[in-house]
Image (tube, grey):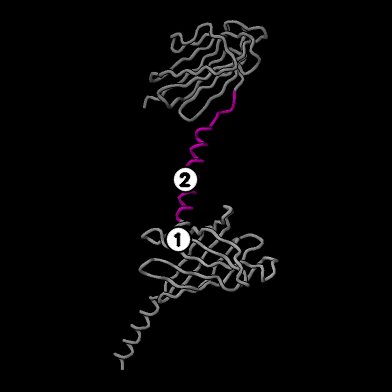
Amino acid sequence: MKIYKLVLLIILNKVSFCQIDYNFSGVLILENDQEISYSLNLIEKDGKISGFSLTNIGLEDETKTEINGLYFKYENEFQLNEKNNIYTNSNKEPEKFCFISMNLKFSSSKKRYLEGTFEGYFRNGKKCSKGKVLLIEEKKIKKISKNILKKIENNTNNRLKVKKIIATKNIQTQDTIKIEWDSDSVKINIWDSNQEDGDKINLKLNDKTILNNFVTNKNKKTINLKLKKGKNFLNLVAVNEGLSPPNTSKVELIDKKVTYPIITKLKKNENLTFELIKNIY
């Protein structure tokens, strides 16, 4: 008796394992290239299919429809037919619903993608639509979405780092500005952010002339300079005051992904010094 019960239990377990669930989401693509959101929730047992579809997912006319059909294991193919609406949010009259029949096939060995064609028919048998079906396993979609979100988060963080800008300083006196520096070099952008009036400047790094009698204008002048360990002195001198005093220049000092923007307003022969302190370690 015990052996009989054990055999029966094994048989029942085998029968239950024959049932396979399939959950796919994607689109129906009509002949005019219109795309309609679509999903399939199927149960396959011994080659027979039951389940339902969802059309226009999340929209005001979302519709859930009964599905039945066949699965051909060795060909990895489905023949599916929509039958009756389980529910709909649409105001259409019943005879105006288009029920589709599909021929689908797995397009990968891991059975993550379903592709095929469909034809739609009204209740009276009149053809109402035709097109392609493209579906992805929902587990795969969730994995892809998770990876995309992670990439977006990483890219967003990177963009935030790139755009990290210290508040703009307006300099009108002969100041020395001290900045702790991380990079082995400094990128300098210099231009006239106001009216072009012939302002001229001199620029030196550690007493080495970089620019001499340079006329600033609307176009950025970009310079990349190597720094030594310890203190580096970048000196900017107003050669004149142009046609509209004072001498005004917009300066950006860029340390890797941090930008230090400064606006200078200097009289003739006044100077401004940036002390860039390069970490020794």
Q: Position of residue 254 (x, y in %)?
A: 49, 24
- Give the image location of residue 6, x and y in percent: 32, 87
Above or below for 132 versus 83 = above
Q: Residue furthest left?
A: 3
Horizontally, residue 124 falls left or right of residue 103, namely: right
**Disc 1 residue type?**
Leu
**What type is the residue that disc 2 sits on?**
Lys
| Nearer to the camera, 171 or 212 | 212
Q: In the rendered view, tell whether residue 158 sits above or below residue 102.
A: above
Q: Earlier in the sequence, mark 1 or mark 2?
A: 1
The foreground one among 235 and 33 is 33
Measured from the top left, where is residue 12 in percent x and y? 37, 83
Residue, far front? 126
| Mark 2 nearby-residue class (10 Å; few <14, some 14–19, many ≥20) | few
Q: Give the residue pinned by disc 2.
A: 151
Report if residue 130 lies within the magenta region.
Answer: no
Is 162 part of what is drawn in magenta?
Answer: yes
| Residue 86 as seen in the image, left or right of residue 24 | right
| Marking on residue 114 | 1
Residue drawn at x 45%, y 61% is 114
What is the magenta range? 143-168
Binning the other alpha carbons within 10 Å of mark 1 as few (below 14), some (14 to 19) or many (20 upward) gives many
Magenta stretch: helix, strand or loop mostly: helix
On the image, the x and y values in percent for residue 253 come to: 51, 22
Q: Quadrant of the N terminus?
A: bottom left
